[in-house]
Image: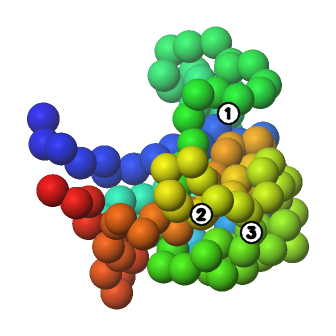
Amino acid sequence: MDQRISAITLGVADVNRSRAFYENLGWKSTKASDENVAFFQMNGCALVLFPTKELAKDAGVDRPGSGFDNVTLSYNVGTQTQVKQVLAKAKKAGGTILRDAGQAFWGGFTAYFADPDGHAWEVAYNPFWKIDAKGNIKLPK
C-alpha cells in the first residue's frame, strides 16, 4: 500500500447544505457533484460529502453517534494572521468555533471550527512545516 490518501469522505446530514458551507469558504465542487454527493478536488486528493446514513451503510457499520469522533482535519496556512482570517470566514459561512485562535503548546498557532455536521477542522500555522505555492506541506526530515 502506497503512503497516500486518495479521498476523505465526510458523512453529512444534508449534502446541499454542506456543499454550500464549503463553497462559502471559497472551495469549488466538481461537475460530478449532485444532490446525493459532492466532490471537491484538493491538492492530490478529494474531499467527498456523502449522506451519513448511506456512508455508514456503505461501510457496513451503524450510524455513528454525535460528538467528537477522534478525528480532525487540518488546514495549514503560512501566518498567524491567516489562521484568524480562515476562522472568521468559517464562522461567516455557518461554522461553529470550537477553539479561538491562539498559541499552541508545540510552538505553533491554531484554532478549531466545526462544519455544519460537526466535523472538526484545525486551522494551523506551523513554523516548522513548509507550504509550497499549491498548499502542499513538506514535513521536516
Looking at numbered disc 1 in the image, what kind of residue is underneath it? Answer: Thr
Rendered location of residue 123, percent (x, y): 61, 62
Please give left or right for residue 85 compared with residue 48 in the image.
right
Q: Please name the residue that numbered disc 2 is placed on.
A: 109
Q: Where is 127 relative to 47, above or below?
A: below
Looking at numbered disc 2 in the image, what kind of residue is underneath it? Answer: Phe
Q: Nearer the viewer, residue 93 or 11?
A: 93
Q: Residues within 10 Å of mark 2 (few under 14, many from 20)?
A: many
Q: Earlier in the sequence, mark 2 or mark 3?
A: 3
Residue plotted at (64% across, 59% down): 103
Q: Is residue 17 visible?
A: no
Please give left or right for residue 51 compared with residue 28 in the image.
right
Q: Please name the residue that numbered disc 1 is placed on.
A: 52
Question: Which corner quadrant of the image does residue 97 belong to?
Answer: bottom right
Looking at numbered disc 3 in the image, what kind of residue is underneath it? Answer: Leu
Tell me whether circle 3 and circle 1 mark residues in contact (CB < 8 Å): no
The dot on residue 87 is 3
Q: How is the image coloured?
A: rainbow
Rendered location of residue 6, percent (x, y): 31, 51
Q: Earlier in the sequence, mark 1 or mark 2?
A: 1
Question: Which corner quadrant of the image does residue 34 belong to?
Answer: bottom right
Q: Where is 97 relative to 31, above or below?
A: above
